[in-house]
Amino acid sequence: MPPSVTRPYSQPLNLWLCLGIPLLGAITLILLELTSLDMDLARLAYDSTAGAFIGKHSYFLETILHDRAKQVVIALSVLAIAVFISSFMLGRLKPYRRELGCLVLSMALATGFVTPLKAVTAVQCPWSLSEFGGKETYSELLSPRPPTDKPGRCWPGGHAATGFSLFALFFVLRDRRPRLARAALIFAFALGTVFSIGRMLQGAHFFSHNVWTAVFCWLISLGSYYAVLYRNKAAEKVTEPDAISVQS
């Protein structure tokens, strides 16, 4: 019989930090809609002489950083699912079943929300816009979409979500391995950022698309952790009633 592993109580959650920063980021992104920041950054990545984004035909950005990197993260997701299923059959994995389930749930939600939201919002990609050699008309996120036969599918950023979905590792590890959790957080943020920049250089997304994606992925990971793993010691503490002696 493998030794029993007790699930630890959770470290306190600083909601001002965990919720405040992403919500402040969301408000900032809404206000940025009043500026030309997205377009200005896209112009920096556009070569008007060649009539294309500087990364459009990059083998590294398309094949390595996009296709192969996505395949690696997908493989990690499949492995997580396989290990989670195995936890129902292997005693040594049983104590970690909730962590594995939380990881699978969080990564599935953080990547699965993208496609439906793209279809609903119909935001155009930079490479489709007339300013960058395309035929479509630019519109802000919260503005009505101009009539078109080819609705956009570019908000939020799908490839960015592939990287930022690994925020789940931070929450899954934070109660058992806090140092490793912090390293996982840095890795997830760095990977999502690199994926975001790569797609911006290719003209696939605006800056704000990827930051919105990071906010969504963080909130999904936080929500999954709170629903599945968070274990509040104070809430679970049982107060025994004082004994009352009854005399006849």
Image (cartoon, helix red, strand yellow):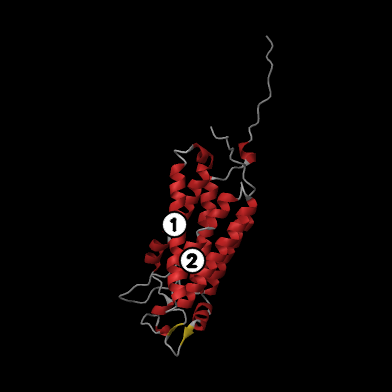
244 up-or-down from 228: above or below: above
In this picture, residue 202 sits left or right of residue 13: left
- Name the residue at 42% across, 70% down: 154
In this picture, residue 223 sits left or right of residue 148: right
Mark 1, residue position? 75
- Residue 77, image x, y percentages: 45, 54
Q: CA distance from mark 2 to mark 1?
A: 17 Å
Nearer the observer: mark 2 or 1; the answer is: 1
Task: Return the residue nearer the eye: 171 or 155.
Answer: 171
Mark 1 neighbour density, 10 Å: few (under 14) some (14–19) many (20 or more): few
- Residue 112, image x, y percentages: 42, 58
Task: Return the residue nearer the eye: 241 or 80.
Answer: 80
Judge whether residue 107 can be spotted in this image: yes
Mark 2 neighbour density, 10 Å: few (under 14) some (14–19) many (20 or more): many
Residue positioned most to the bottom: 49
Q: Which mark is residue 174?
A: none
- Name the residue at 54% across, 65% down: 191
The image shows a total of numbered marks equal to 2
Mark 2, residue position? 160
Helix, strand or loop at label 1? It is: helix
Helix, strand or loop at label 2? It is: helix
Identify the amino acid type marked 1.
Answer: Ala
